[in-house]
Image (spheres, helix red, strand yellow):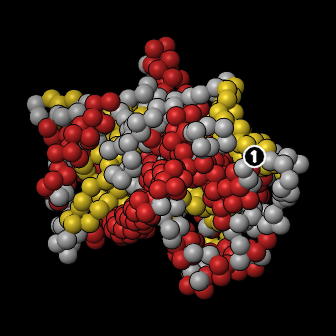
Amino acid sequence: MPSSLPPETVDTPPVSGKRWTTVATSRSEIAALLESRDWSRTPLGARETWPASLTGLVRTVLSSPVAMTLLLGPDGIMIYNAGYAAIASGRHPTCFGMSAIACWPEVADFNRTIIDGVLSGECFSYADMEMTLNRSGEPERVWFDLDYSPVFDDEGAISGALAVVVETTKAVEAKQALARNREKLSLALQASGVVGIWDWDVVADRVYADDRFASLYGVDPETAATNGVPISGFTAGIHPDDAERVSNVLQGVMKTGEKLSIEYRLVQADGSVRWVLAEGQPLLENGTCIRFPGIAVDITAQKEVAEAYAQSETGFRTLADTMPQMVWSTRPDGFHDYYNARWYEFTGVPPGSTDGAGWSGIFHPEDQDRAWALWRHSLETGDPYQIEYRLRHHSGAYRWVLGRALPIRDADGRITRWYGTCTDIHDAKMAQAEREVVAHELSHRIKNIFSVLSGIISLSARSEPQARGFAEQLRKRIDAMGRAHDFVRPHSEASRPTMPDTTLFNFLARLLEPYWGEEGKGAIRLHGDDTAIADSAATPLALLLHELGTNSAKYGALSTADGRVEITGRIDGETYHLRWKEKVQGVVISAPEKDGFGSRLMKISAEGQLEGQLERFWEPDGLRIEASIPLSALTRSGRLGRR
């Protein structure tokens, strides 16, 4: 992969007032680092095991002229390009392949927040973010434009963050300097009105100027102040590329008497270039210009800021065009005025045809009203925009995409722009639908088996009256297992069963009904604090308790006539503690040599889906399970906030 990268070199830009170590890093050097790194010793594993999505993304990042780094996994393992290496300065190449948390300890808390947030599906964007970094041996105050977005693995899961980094230190310092200069300029104007003043006696061709104006044009200040200098002495300093334009404008306003206002470059004695804004008012007598006074203001700092922002905009557009997602942006009122190359490749529409409200026309007709309503809500409230809809592909087919957008706000909280992405999720959507069909079919067949068993038991009981009581009890347990199965099987939002039971204890009683004693009690006892639960907690709870009940019926307390299971609930602040304790005599239970699928399933249910903790204790009188689950995970509905 690295051999395809051109050996372009990126130099660290000097920053005024800072001691920098110049670092020149080529793309080939970064590629060599990627090849030489022993990735098997990192959480990412050996390179040959990397998913195709990661390999492709690494290639894109390393090829990009924009400074970018990948922050992979919960530790934020860094894989960056030559542009980022220049920004990292003295921290490069140590940071390559290492955790961002460890490599940048001075901003560890910030990086931790970013990594955790992106892994949870969030995006972050910062303009002129101020930081204090130690890049070359001493702390320095720096500013960055930062954008973080999720990256996905081959399964569609978020595997890390893509960070786009544009250092704006020079631009910010220029803006700050410009603000200070403007303040000084204002004070000077108020005090004496002297700010680069010139007065051209056109008839005598003598230009009289103050020290500041003369010095800016490379003219002797004393001569300019006392005797005046011909206009050619000043125009000689104008940049050759601007000289003809300035001459034409001067001649034009001297004929019409219009006010002069023009920007141009001056070449200084040392070869550097300064930008000036010259403004003046020609004085005409009988149609002839006899005098031309005015001022000139050094606007070099302003031009540098504008150039820096232009470069940043170019970098953004370059990055947007290299991203696999469709990227778009709008003005604060929602007028769409930018789409990246991926948008036009996907839709096949002519550039500019979807500006404004034209984007709605390529949505599926059934999705247009819903998309418009949600977009208007986001514009009115500033809430993030997120929706799944069908977008017309250039082939003419409609494909499902995930649309997201976030607002950019200024220092006063006003929205200045919206940035959004569209991600093609059609294949994943279709695969999910196929899995749902298979799950429905399997569930249907399993429930048919339960029904057949119940029917066989009922028929058998008719021919064996003496076993009728036992048969009825057995049939009830099989029916209960069928009802419990509805909660244990995988569900989508559409297929998830409703929750008639609103508390955990009621739900457990229903789920564990197959394991109750003859009178519906005794074998399992519930104690302590009950709590309300929502639909989203039903499936992981069912998986956890069903696995515990099944294992207990096979090997533990519920496998013997005198075995007991005590389930205790306890609320402690914002945490719900659930204890499963088995008590059985005469059965030796020991910890397994390795965890099986059931144990892993319980861990996933409790710690992954319910965001809690699960511990197992193998005690002399039976197994004890301790589960700590946030109350919020039990009570929040999976249907809230979904679009």
* Residue found at x 28% / y 71%: 345
Res. 481 in view:
no
Instruction: Examine the rendered structure and indicate whether residue 184 appears above or below residue 2.
Output: above
| Residue 474 position within the rendered picture, expressed as x and y whole percent measured from the top left | 52, 54
For disc 1, the marked residue is 562
Q: How crowded is mark 1: few (under 14 residues within 10 Å), some or many (20 or more)?
A: few
View extreme (top): residue: 191
Residue 594 % position (x, y): 79, 66
Observer-nearest of 423 and 281? 423
Q: Which residue is drawn at 19% across and 52% down?
A: 367
Q: In this view, does 306 lie to the left or right of 108?
A: left
Asked if residue 352 can be seen in this view, the reply is: yes
Q: In this view, does 17 lie to the left or right of 417?
A: right
Question: In the rendered view of the protein, which quadrant contains the C terminus?
Answer: top left
View extreme (left): residue = 286
Which amino acid lies under the numbered mark 1 shown in the image of this protein? Answer: Asp
User: Looking at this view, is 123 or 623 the one in front?
Assistant: 623
- The N terminus - image quarter: bottom right
In the image, 225 versus 53, the foreground residue is 53
The relative height of residue 450 versus residue 7 in the rendered view (above or below) is: above
